[in-house]
Amino acid sequence: SNWRHSRPHVVKAWWLAQISAMAVRPSATMRCCSLLAAVSLADGLRGLPIPAALRSAAPVASTSRSLRTVQNIRRTPHACRASPVISMKWDVQLAPWQLEYGLQDPSIPLPTGALESGAPAPFEITDEQRARLIEDGVVHIPGLLNDEWLEYLRSATDWQVQNPHFWSVAGVVSGLYDYIQRSIWSSNSAFANFMYYSPLASALAGLSNAEELRLATDLLMVNPNKGFKWHQDNQNGPIDAFGDNKALRWWVTMDDTPPDHGAPVYLKGSHRNTCVSPDAVFVDLEQDGLLQYPELLEFRPKAGDLIVWHARSIHKIDGPSSADWGSSKRRVLGGTVALNAATYESMGRALFSDMGSHGLVDGDPLVHPLFPKIYPKPEPSEMAERAAGRCTRTREGMTRLASRMFESAGEMVSWTRVLKAKEKSRA
Ligand SMILES: O=C(O)CCC(=O)C(=O)O
């Protein structure tokens, strides 16, 4: 029984050691990349279906208040802030022999009629909602998912957590989330079907008046233990997501927001800022000139709600003060869609959703099964590529990512040197 208790910690320590080795030794990194590529190509074990989770829908609320109020709240001392212990409370099994490496199919039945329609379910967007997105840079759409779709997405998520994929390891080991996995549409057919048939794509098209949408990236995020401080989004896939009318960020929650944490908060109008560098992720409101956007939009979405925003909108989510969601759940599927005739624009960036082989170069039309069309309807040939396991990470794609990460690490080092030299000369 001692082993049973200590096993998760041993496995976690083992993965941490692997990841640290990758970070500090370039040669080891390259070796790991080859290993990761090899296992990503392997067609692994299949998982088994798990019964659906329970649903609880509730009414909607969102509030707007001033930055000053929220800054005061943030300054309130938190109980137990020190040394939070992240438990593997969902008992995510990360032992290498318990992971899935290839395609996964939980065989969860789709809501009635979804498959037959061959297209996303309809969803009406109002003029007021469209105007809010343009004006504020963010909009809350209550009730995107009906009971059937909500239960479907919850079942898919719970199944995924109980059948973790190899690609979730780094995120789960970090403890930032209880479970986190990017490009989940490509490995798990339940999430692919959600993208093809749920009302999500119709809502996004309605908000942007787009005629065509492609999925540029997605991310399953379960329980953000430490929250996510003020930031803009720059992992949007190989597209120009900061451009005008080029992309939309989206976020569908499967759980009600708790009363005192977990609420997405946005700086109203901050999508128009010109002071935050496109490379930045986290921002400092004062130093980055963002106090000119003093109005906060704080949303308290309910299960099944959607939030949509511009990638430049500055936002955050505060985790619980204990940095641990305990037994409660906060399951979210989020991502970015490219609008209309988008082009492939990697711009030399290290992009976590661009780890496959596609032959596209900057400026090419973004037409490839790795960035699947989801509106007005999915493309059967692209769906077949995914189902055959060919929308996956490859050695070429991972080497591309690794080399770009090294390049940006090199840039960062030389930039820090320049900064230090400047500071010295000033002193
Ligand atoms: O929901 C979360 O955990 C973080 C969401 C977020 O800030 C984002 O997707 O940019």
Image (tube, rainbow, N blue to C red):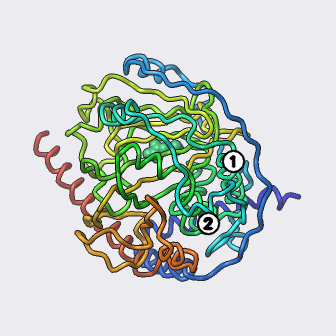
Q: Which residue is mark 1?
A: 148
Mark 2 surroundings within 10 Å by alpha-carbon count, few (fewer than 14), some (14 through 19), many (20 or more): many
Q: What residue do we see at 55% from left, 41% from top?
A: 144
Nearer to me, 222 or 378: 378
- For ligand 1, tell me if the residue under mark 1 lies within 8 Å: no
Q: Position of residue 18 (x, y in %)?
A: 56, 69
- Viewport quadrant of the C terminus: top left
* Residue 343 in which image quadrant: bottom left
Of tags 1 and 2, the one toward the viewer is 1
Q: What residue do we see at 30% from left, 48% from top?
A: 280
Inspect the image, locate mark 1, and give the three-letter code of the amino acid beneath it.
Glu
Q: Position of residue 93 (x, y in %)?
A: 72, 62
Residue 179 disc label = none
Residue 31 in sight from this viewpoint: yes
Residue 188 disc label = 2
Nearer to me, 397 or 381: 381
Inspect the image, locate mark 2, and give the three-letter code of the amino acid beneath it.
Asn
Q: At numbered mark 2, what does the secondary structure look like: helix, strand or loop?
A: loop
Q: What residue do we see at 77% from left, 63% from top?
A: 49
Nearer to me, 407 or 318: 318
